[in-house]
Image (cartoon, rainbow, N blue to C red):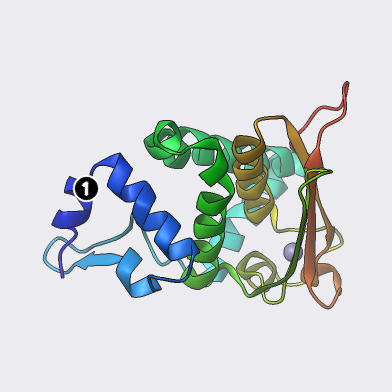
Amino acid sequence: MSYTVQTLMNQGDLVKKLIEYAEGRLKLSDMISVDAERCEFRHPLQRMVALPAKALASVLRELESVIGPAYISVIIEGAKRYTREVELKQIGDYVSPENRMKVVSAMFRLYRELGWGKVFDVEFDEGKGVLRFRVENSVEADGWGSSEHPVCHIILGYNIALMEWALGKPMIGEEVRCKAKGDPYCEFVIRAAESGEDGGFS
Ligand SMILES: [Zn+2]
């Protein structure tokens, strides 16, 4: 398999493909590609790598041990920046405002199916602009092990940035339950920032 076709795809076709995936008309296997010769693996917007969950957690724990609790905002802000400057930058101008939540759904489904965890009980209150979702087996929580604070900062930051783009306003988010803390699942709430609130991390 090669991803030649995918890299030649123009942004308009790429957005169309993401919307078809969000609507269930395409499968994960339609969205990823492997170039065995070059040893590369991609989803439509970025080259990927399968990283052991505990290797990721080991790096993040080391960061926490060096810089302390500030590591949380570093990770959340880094995840937000990646989402905005790498993924959304490629397609943002090609998505009509009414299709933005469809593209968010596609990215939501894509990362879920790539192993970030089983999402359930998704609630989106369009009027209030509040997204709430739960993750049964977050790879960040599983990799980290037990913790006194929530640990799924990449999932949180990524989804804050998606929602900011979809709704066109600053959002803040919090992981209100985390399996690493002993909760039965992780739960995230992302909502519009009120004036004076410094959006982005809990
Ligand atoms: Zn968690």
- The picture quadrant for ligand 1 comes to bottom right
Tell me the residue at 64%/55% (across/down). 155
Q: Nearer the viewer, residue 28 or 182?
A: 28
Looking at the image, the residue that sits furthest to the left is: 37
Residue 192, position as x, y percentages in the image: 80, 36
The answer to whether 174 is drawn above or below residue 118 in the figure is: above
Q: Residue tagged by mark 1?
A: 9
Residue under the point 77% across and 32% down: 199
Q: Quadrant of the N terminus?
A: bottom left
Mark 1 residue's CB less than 8 Å from ligand 1:
no
Rendered position, 189 above or below 78: below
Local secondary structure at mark 1: loop
When the figure is inspected, residue 98 is found, relative to residue 25, above or below; the finding is: above
Image location of residue 10, percent across then percent down:
24, 42
- Residue 46, visible in the rendered structure: no
Q: Is residue 122 visible?
A: yes
Residue nearest the observer in this picture, 14 or 146: 14
Specify the quadrant of the image occupied by residue 161.
top right
Q: Residue at x 71, y 76 (%)?
A: 136
x and y percent of residue 59 in the render? 57, 55
Residue kind at label 1, given as amino acid type: Met
Quadrant of res 182: bottom right
Q: Is residue 60 left or right of residue 92?
A: right
